[in-house]
Image (cartoon, grey):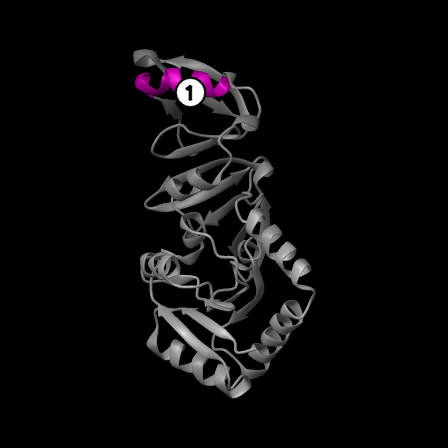
Amino acid sequence: MKMKVLIIEDETAAVRNLKTLLLQIEPDAEVVGITESIVDTVEWLGHNPMPDLVFMDIHIADGESFRIFDLTDIDAPIIFTTAYDQYALEAFKVNSIDYLLKPLKEADLKRALDKWRRLTNTEKSEYRSNVNRLVAERNVKSDVFLVHVKDKIIPLKIKDIAFFYTFNERVTAYSVDGNTYPIDKTLEALQAQLPEYDFYRANRQFIISRNAIKDISVWFGSRLSVNMVIATPERIVVSKARVPDFKRWLQAVQP
């Protein structure tokens, strides 16, 4: 079977290296498309047959490639290629079969392609079942963040987070035990990822966890002051305009 491959990558040198290694290992492979951005990829997938295999970088021209899965269906196996190791857990939330770090090595690529071949050589119905399961699971929100602390990668469970706080364009997660962790996302991106029942965007600085609210005080100007189970860098104030929405969130029934 001739392997039809889509490459999602915005670095010319990386594309050239991947194609060279790929054709050394699989001379009959055909690169049917190369896209550099989320927009280009979604458009390509909308106008072309699904490839047999996708190589996907994570940081591409207009953002993280994980966004593609929110905009279109990809039911082909994916091999992620990236210079960053902190996205491994998120990668395996989608239909990924391997995660290769740049610069790519021939042995690693061969191993990944062997894995792809074993997958496609299973019974067709089993393969389709596996892919459908992986595609269905991609919309399940992760319950863990992978955070870098010095030279370590730490899995931080969402249920252990009291709040997220942004200052000087840096976002920090505060756990219920008082520890802090740098987060490489904006509050806007986090808001889209976090479960709505459990977390609320209180203001421009804070996203707070329902389970970490200690009590709430009436503040000046019909505003509310939210007190958490741990100390906060500054007072969490909910504006008068947002108070009704905040109260609805507090009174919501868990789905």
Queried whether the magenta region covers residue 192, the answer comes back as no
Horizontal and vertical percent position of residue 113: 59, 75
Horizontal and vertical percent position of residue 15: 39, 76
Near-viewer residue (189 or 22): 22
Mark 1 surroundings: few (<14), some (14-19) or many (≥20) residues within 10 A: some
Count up the numbered dots.
Answer: 1
What amino acid is at disc 1?
Answer: Phe
Q: Main secondary structure of the magenta part?
A: helix
Horizontal and vertical percent position of residue 239: 33, 20
Kindly identify the residue that appears in the image at 65 percent across and 67 percent down: 119
Horizontal and vertical percent position of residue 56: 45, 65
As drawn, 41 above or below 13: above
As drawn, 14 above or below 147: below
Task: Please state, as top left, top right, bottom left or bottom right, where the N terminus lies in the image.
Answer: bottom right
- Which residue, given by chain and number where applicable, does mark 1 sit on? 246
Near-viewer residue (29 or 207): 29
64 left or right of 115 in image? left
Queried whether the magenta region covers residue 246, the answer comes back as yes
Kindly identify the residue that appears in the image at 63 percent across and 68 percent down: 120
Toward which corner of the image does residue 236 lie, by quadrant?
top left
As drawn, 17 above or below 183: below
Range drawn in magenta: 239-250
Task: Please state, as top left, top right, bottom left or bottom right, where the C terminus lies in the image.
Answer: top right
